[in-house]
Image: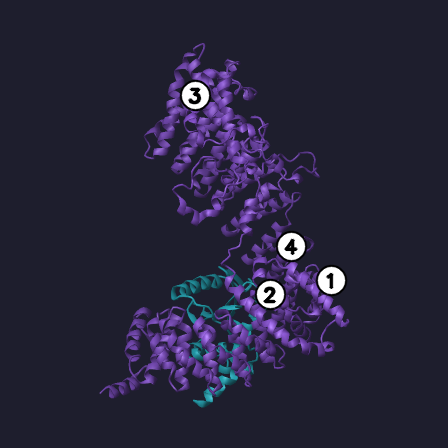
Amino acid sequence: MSSSNSLMDNLFQRSLEDLIKGFRLQLLGESAYISRALEEIRREIKVTDLSTKSTALHKLTYLAALHGVDMSWAAFHAVEVVSSPRFQHKRIGYQAITQSFNDQTSVMLLITNQVRKDLNSVNEFEASLALECLSRIGTHDLARDLTPEVFTLLGSSKTFVRKKAIGVVLRVFEKYHDAVKVCFKRLVENLESSDPQILSAVVGVFCELATKDPSSCLPLAPEFYKILVDSRNNWVLIKVLKIFAKLASIEPRLGKKVAEPICEHMRRSVAKSLVFECVRTVVSSLSDQEAALKLAVAKIREFLVEDDPNLKYLGLHALSIVAPKHLWAVLENKEVVVKALSDEDPNVKLEALHLLMAMVNEDNVSDISRILMNYALKSDPFFCNEIIYSVLSACSRNAYEIVVDFDWYLSLLGEMARIPHCQRGEEIEHQLVDIGMRVRDARPQLVRVSWALLSDPALLGNLFLHPILSAAAWVSGEYAEFSKNPYETVEALLQPRTDLLPPSIKAIYIQSVFKVLVFCLGSYFSAEEPISSSLAQESSSVNAFAYESILNLVNVIELGLGPLSGTHDVEVQERAKNVLGFIGMIREEISEKVNNEAEACRVTAFMEDVFSDDLGPVSATAQEKVCVPDGLELKETLMDLEEICGEFLKPVESDKISFSVSKLRIRDEQEASSSSSHPHEGGAGAASLLEHRKRHGMYYLTSQKDDPDSNVTLNDYPLANELANEISVDLFKPKRKPSKPRPVVVKLDDGDESRSKGKTNPEAGNEDESLSRAIQTALVVKNKGKEKAQEGEESSRIVNHTSLEMKKKKKKKKKNGERSSKDKSRRESEVAATTEQVIIPDFLL
Amino acid sequence: MGIRFILMVNKQGQTRLAQYYEWLTLEERRALEGEIVRKCLARNDQQCSFVEHRNYKIVYRRYASLFFMVGVDDDENELAILEFIHLLVETMDKHFGNVCELDIMFHLEKAHFMLEEMVMNGCIVETSKANILSPIQLMDKAH
């Protein structure tokens, strides 16, 4: 019964071709057709007849590859099909396996024996199928179990099989490191093969190995050199060049040796791919070989002037590799680069932009920015924002290193905000606030720019600009003393269209209104009563406010904030209420014009005091620098935590503490000074603070007297951080344009950045490392055997013909140099025994 | 690894061949193919044949209605990959005789077979047309 069924199935089964034809004729819709076909396949694949089964699997594989159908459920059927004695079935089975198996496939274990059988098969095509399969899905177990077979095939007399065995080696090594011990020697022997097919395969494998770990391939440099000089196959040469690019980066002396043959290829070859590979090798790894670099840059120029967009792109790309070390190469091609900014291809434009930014320095930054802003205005949104981002990041690099004229830069930021496509609001916001805090001299211009932004009602409608507006609002409040006309500022902050802002930014607007109001009141009172407060004195230069204008201001604010006191957002409501409450408190006294005005004056002075604390930039490492005070029991009940984050809890030496402590100290000083100079004003606050200190003394930091920087006075700028000595020296170098000296830019230590970068993940390199260790061990074995042979054939190698003693000495020297150049001390110590035995041939010298 | 995947996609964005040299789940493949196809098909002839996508570099070339797209590592030689694509097309041309989209649709396994001869584990191992085609011809004869 069942056999007749299967016969029927077989007779009427649709072949893959029928399935594909059906696809083109079907009227059901694709997904319905696929699900119908799948039903059919599920039925057919269960029958015992292998040819029906394999056809079903074939169809399923097709659907999975091109229509994204899941075929993991058929894993076992694939194993069944692959065990068929017929080659046709086997092929279908292997195809299905390579396409659908992965490390998690449970039936993976079942194929080991079948693959082994096929690897040993006399039919080279069966062996080839098995190798292909192993190269794609090989797991640790498969690689371990099949290493002997792969080893045998590496020496096969059939080129067809041998080259595939070479190709599979990479996967085997990767998954099972011990295979290196077994197979590496044979792999290296293949490197000397005269068969171009073998050579092509084996060079590809070494290229990958060298990418993973160059140092392990270094001893094979003579072999690669021979290929570089002798081979005429461009594919092979490209791979060898890649290998040398990697090797030269760890062994600089190689550069001198290979530069000449590489130049020869550059001059001789007509194949653009080979020439480009030579160029890339030279600019990335041999850039200190002057002659080679010159030739490479000349070739780049040829690429740049070609009409072919591919060559133009690659030329620009090569320039961007060489730019950090040899900027002259870019400068020579400046016109081409600028022209490429208006290229049709966005990729070319991006490369050109990156190159242009590499050329930026303090002399040309304004010119380049102007050119770029013009491009940004007429570019598509994506490229426009790329431009804006590039300019922003280039100018802010290393605490605005290249910006000399901050007035210009702030105007530029203002301009950026007005570019229609601008979407980099957050970055601009950050920089506006950052410059305000870091560059005291730039504040007047900052306030001007902010005012221009705030007073433009059109900007409020653009969602991307809201962050910028929030920064502008903050700036106008924080630095209200530089405002030309506080009344207009307040009007701008309260204009009706601010309803378009999100509540969080609206709250900043209200807070800024508050700050401006306090400032105006402060100068109003200090003008009337010059002896009242020392804090108002610095602003006495600003025109004092007449009674009417103050009243007017208060009225405008009340009018603007009134509706907000009933808004739904609690933050906005609260802030509005605060301001309104404050106004209520002082209002009568202004209007009555009482003689002494004690209450209003006192309140205003108090608020001014609150707002007068100058904010400074905060170092990212500030928190770490605070040491744990004595007597603070952190570990008592948190012993478990130590295991998890023990290293973070280590206290830092106290002399490194700089920022946060001083900040607190300043607060204390202010508290003290205000309480001493105006005992009747700050009394309450100071008293409660003292009380607090008495009770919770252990949480306070040590008194400022033993702080080495305690001579910094309150008015010394920068206040927030006494790191003025850490501002890099070259900031003060005389500039070529002495008309306007660069203002002081507060810069905190940026050690934290480099530290986090330097820290490498110890786990990351593990895989590759153990692989390279295996290779090194294998090379030791190989070289031990080879040494004797080498001595005999010295003359045939490219070596210095020195006496044996000299050679030995040199070898020793080289080893030392080699060791110091490598900075992998951890691994070094682990494999010290093996690395020392690795012999680096004299070829390098 | 060099080559990470090879795709053949027609003008309508339908995948005609997909060969991956690293494991990606079905969803990942579908998402990747969709993004790449959208990116590449939007470009014109005056633009270069290289597109950066996530951590891949895509080198593509159009032949009539079919796009050949190869995803490679960042340091792979772009021009060599273009030559590889051309070699693949020439090889198929030689076998099918003036190859077209339908040939690849109906003889997908042959196209795969050629690729397997040319690329192993992401490395290009064979660049001679005769060597690539000889096993296929043998198998055709055996049929």
Q: Pointer 3: what residue?
A: A687
Q: Position of residue A664 (x, y in %)?
A: 50, 31
Mark 4 vs mark 3: which is more N-terminal? 4
Instruction: State the residue at coordinates (47%, 16%).
Output: A679
- On screen, A448 above or below A837? above
Relative to A662, A15 lies left or right: left
Q: Do badges 4 and 3 share one subunit? A: yes
Query: Among the chains, which one is purple?
Result: A
Q: Nearer the viewer, mark 2 or mark 4?
A: 2
Mark 2 vs mark 1: which is more N-terminal? 1
Specify the amino acid type for callout 1: Ala
| Spatial separation of the CA atoms under disc 2 and disc 3 | 70 Å
Mark 1 vs mark 3: which is more N-terminal? 1
Q: Pointer 4: what residue?
A: A323
Mark 2 vs mark 3: which is more N-terminal? 3
Instruction: State the residue at coordinates (60%, 54%).
Output: A352
Q: Pointer 2: what residue?
A: A833
Q: Do badges 4 and 1 share one subunit? A: yes
Relative to A629, A84 lies left or right: left
| Spatial separation of the CA atoms under disc 4 and disc 1 | 17 Å
Specify the amino acid type for callout 3: Ala
Mark 4 belongs to chain = A
Q: Give whichever of A218, A199 is nearer the camera.
A: A218
Q: Secondary structure at mark 2?
A: helix
Mark 2 vs mark 4: which is more N-terminal? 4
Q: Position of residue A172 (x, y in %)?
A: 49, 73
Mark 4 vs mark 1: which is more N-terminal? 1
Q: Nearer the viewer, mark 4 or mark 3?
A: 3
| Spatial separation of the CA atoms under disc 2 and disc 4 | 40 Å
Q: Chain B is which colour? A: cyan
Q: Pointer 1: what residue?
A: A291
